[in-house]
Image: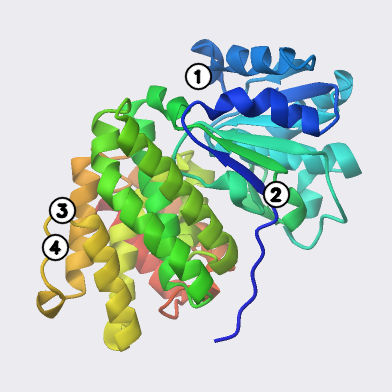
Amino acid sequence: MDFTFSIPQNVVFGAGSLSKLPEIATKLKKSKALIISGPHLEKIGLVEKCSDALETAGIESVSFCRTEANPSVETVEAATALYSESNADFIVAFGGGSPLDVAKAVAVIATYGGKITEYEGGGKVPGPVIPTIAIPTTAGTGSEVTAFSVITDHSRNYKLTVASNYLLPEYAILDSELISTVPKGTAAACGIDAMIHALESYISKASSPFSEMFSLRALELIGQSVRDYVKDRENSIAARKMMLGSLFAGIAFSHARLGDVHAMSHPVSAFFDIPHGVANAILLPKVVEFNSASTKEPDMLEKFYQIYRCVCKNPVSKAEFLPNMLSAELSSLNAELEIPNNLEKAGVEKNAFENVIQKMANDAMKSGNINVNPRETKREDILKLYRKSFSED
């Protein structure tokens, strides 16, 4: 099999590695940072801790802490305005996937102008953007090592994706101590999101020996630790494994893309403002069950077993394994982590769902992830999966 890959970033990993921020920021030879974060991290004092670290290197900072769960075009514009008004010359993205997505979008707009909607798709960013240091505070999105920014356009209830290697942060700092304060529900949703990144990239039609190596190791790390981490976020061993698993999964899907789960979850979040990880988790068992038809191929059956082996606490032998065991195990994992098992339980009303399901299916089919899903997927398949995900346990 022929394939290509590149990992052009500088990644610092380790407990307490936030202390390296002054040293890393100094390497950029810049003088003022815009810290893009969220209200929770500001409230518990972590944004101030980040600002204080920069100050020790003689670097000023100003903070934008208004990112939301599914960040909007308007949020990107507000953060970009603060970047310009404050005369900042680099960005520190500090938080979960939302602040990191906003930071990437701001880096584009502050460099080239216009609106983020003008850069939708791949290859629209003309060149290098404002340098960014990414510091994730959740183990989930892997956004610190991905070339994507996902932003919600409320004018059309659509989550647009900007894709370009120019979006890759120059530095990523992964400090497992920072994820010890994550609320339980967020930890569960982000943890399953990371698992799905690993799972979908592993079975993607675009996978390669390179990406599969990262996908499988991510599945092992997350499968070993997600239950313990969600139960006790101060479990340092579990937190370290989760952060490393999220990192590896991010590298994997940057090279192999994802699949139907992500194609379908973006419309769910855009229309109903359900957190991305929750939408993914609800869809996951149904999509895996749908994809089990692809296990007629021996290579795919092997992959399904390897995923099952990683996520199951007491796996059966390979000889005893049946493909439907994986979807059943994923449903059980969701229940164990107290994630709703359908959209109705996540707060989606039936009439609202019926009013937009056709549009959701149209939007899902626009995703490039559909094309690399292991089983060919048609619009009617998407509709069936959405209906199963609405109320079926």
Q: Residue at x 39, y 25 (%)?
A: 180
For residue 168, which numbered disc appears in the image?
A: 2
| Front in this rendered view, residue 68 or 100 | 100
Residue type for callout 2: Leu
For residue 40, which numbered disc appears in the image?
A: 1
- Residues at discs 4 and 2 in contact (Cβ within 8 Å): no
Q: Tell me the CA gap for discs 4 and 2.
A: 37 Å
Residue type for callout 1: His
Q: Which SS class for mark 4?
A: loop
- In the figure, 303 relative to 235: above or below? below
Q: Residues within 10 Å of mark 2 (few under 14, many from 20)?
A: many
- In the figure, 2 relative to 22: above or below? below
> Is 270 positioned to the left or the right of 187 in the image?
right
- Where is residue 42 shown, x and y percent of the image? 56, 15
Q: Does the rendering let one see residue 364?
A: yes
What's the image's color scheme?
rainbow
For residue 313, which numbered disc appears in the image?
A: 3
